[in-house]
Every structure is written in C-alpha cells, then in structure tokens.
Amino acid sequence: MSEILLQIDGREVKAREEMTVLDAAQSVGIFIPTLCHHEKLEPYGACRICTVEVEMGGRTNLVAACVRPVEKNLVVRTRSEKVDRIRKMLLEEQLAHAPDSVEVQKLAQQYGADKDRFEKESSFCILCGLCVRYCAEIKKKEALGFVERGPRRQISFVPEIASKECWSCKECFPLCPTSALQAAYVLTEALAFPGSSRAAEL
Ligand code: SF4
Ligand code: FES
C-alpha cells in the first residue's frame, strides 16, 4: 500500500491511497463536520456538510470530503469563506427540517446559520440515511428504507421485518443526528398501524 503526501490546512499529511480526504484529515486531528458519515459504513455523500475546497493543477473545486479520495499533492482547505457559506446554507436548510436537533443546532451556532431563513417543514429527518444504511450494511436486515421522492422523501420501517427484528436491536436509534426518538416513533407507528405506513409500498 503506497503512501502519498497531500496538504490540509497548510499541513503536510501522509495518507494511504485508499483514504478519503476526511480520513486523512481525521488521521491528523483536523476536524471536518459530518452528518451522514459513519466509519463502519460505505461513504454516502448525502449531507454535504463536510464540503471542503480542494486545489489541484491550479483549479479549485468544492467537494464532499467523505467521498473524495486523497490524491498526491492535493491542497485541501477545510475552512474558507466559500466553505463556511455553503455549510451555513446547508445548516439553515436542515434546521427547517429538524429544528430541535442538538447536533445540527451546535453546528448552526458555529457557522452563524439562521434557523428562520427557510420555512419550517419539520419532518425531523435530514435524510442522512445512517439508519437505513446501518440496517442494510451492518445488520443485513433492511428493516427500514426511504419512501417517496423529493420533498416528501422520508424513512419508513417495513413492518413485517421490523416486528421481528427491531425491538431487540435498536442499534440505529443512537446514530440519528436529529433524534433517537424519531426513529423509535416511526418504528412504533409502523408496527401499530402497518396498513397506514408507506413502508408497505417498499
Ligand atoms: S431518521 Fe435520522 S438517521 Fe435516519 S435518515 Fe433521518 S436523520 Fe438520518
Ligand atoms: S458527511 Fe460527507 S456528505 Fe455527509
């Protein structure tokens, strides 16, 4: 496995070729915020809160650090005016969906995000997919998934699987960046009213 050198926030960082920019930053203690990343799961790139600036051959791009592979001589800036502006806007959008999420609120404060910028559409879910992917990739159960499209997209448990698997597992609950109780609520609803759940359409 060959090592390469890149630069992150002005520091020379050694990384293995298979690492992402997020892995490389974390390996030397440089913090990049994440909301849909989990070290045991495949990179997903949904929330974009890990957006950083990368420079290569004189060109600068904005990329999601959790899915961007490292590259020799890549120059990475984890904070810049552009990066902060994008993170602020993403957090404002997420606050419209999950205004009570402590994790989102903490980041929002750091980036000066305005919780009232977008009209509230409280679904309590920011569609990070952590619960869905954890169930599929780690537990191999697929007891929950996404249903609907666009603004109506949401998570839903599959009652037939959830009724057998979930109450003795619940490992996805604490992964949720908006509220562990949200997953519990959706699960209870799916099991109590399986007919009314859109999970049946999965
Ligand atoms: S319920 Fe929570 S963990 Fe699941 S997709 Fe929504 S925000 Fe992510
Ligand atoms: S943490 Fe990278 S896109 Fe969500």
Image: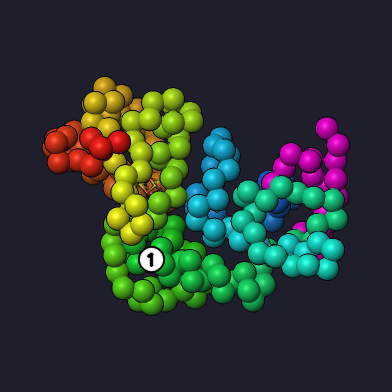
Rendering quarter of residue 126: bottom left
In the image, the segment drawn in magenta is 1-20
Rendering quarter of residue 99: bottom left
Left or right: 146 in relation to 10: left
Residue plotted at (61% across, 56% down): 64
Q: Is residue 98 above or below residue 19?
A: below
Residue beneath label 1, please? 95
Quarter in which the C terminus is drawn: top left
Q: Is residue 114 magenta?
A: no
Q: Is residue 104 above or below residue 154?
A: below
Which residue sits furthest top?
Answer: 164
Q: Is residue 158 above or below residue 75?
A: above
Within 10 angstroms of label 1, few (less than 14), some, or many (20 or more) residues?
Answer: many
| Magenta region, main secondary structure | strand
Q: Is residue 14 magenta?
A: yes
Residue plotted at (33% across, 31% down): 143
Residue plotted at (54% across, 54% down): 34
**Can residue 187 be seen here?**
no
Along the line of sight, the residue nearer the viewer: 171 or 43: 43
Rendering quarter of residue 160: top left
Along the line of sight, the residue nearer the viewer: 168 or 191: 191
Query: How far across and how far down the image is residue 199, in percent?
Result: 25, 38
Three-letter residue code for mark 1:
Leu
Q: Is residue 69 above or below residue 190?
A: below
Residue plotted at (38% across, 66% down): 95
Query: How far across and how far down the image is residue 128, in percent?
Result: 44, 50
Query: How far across and how far down the image is residue 80, in percent?
Result: 67, 72
Query: How far across and how far down the image is residue 193, in percent?
Result: 13, 37
Q: Secondary structure at mark 1?
A: helix
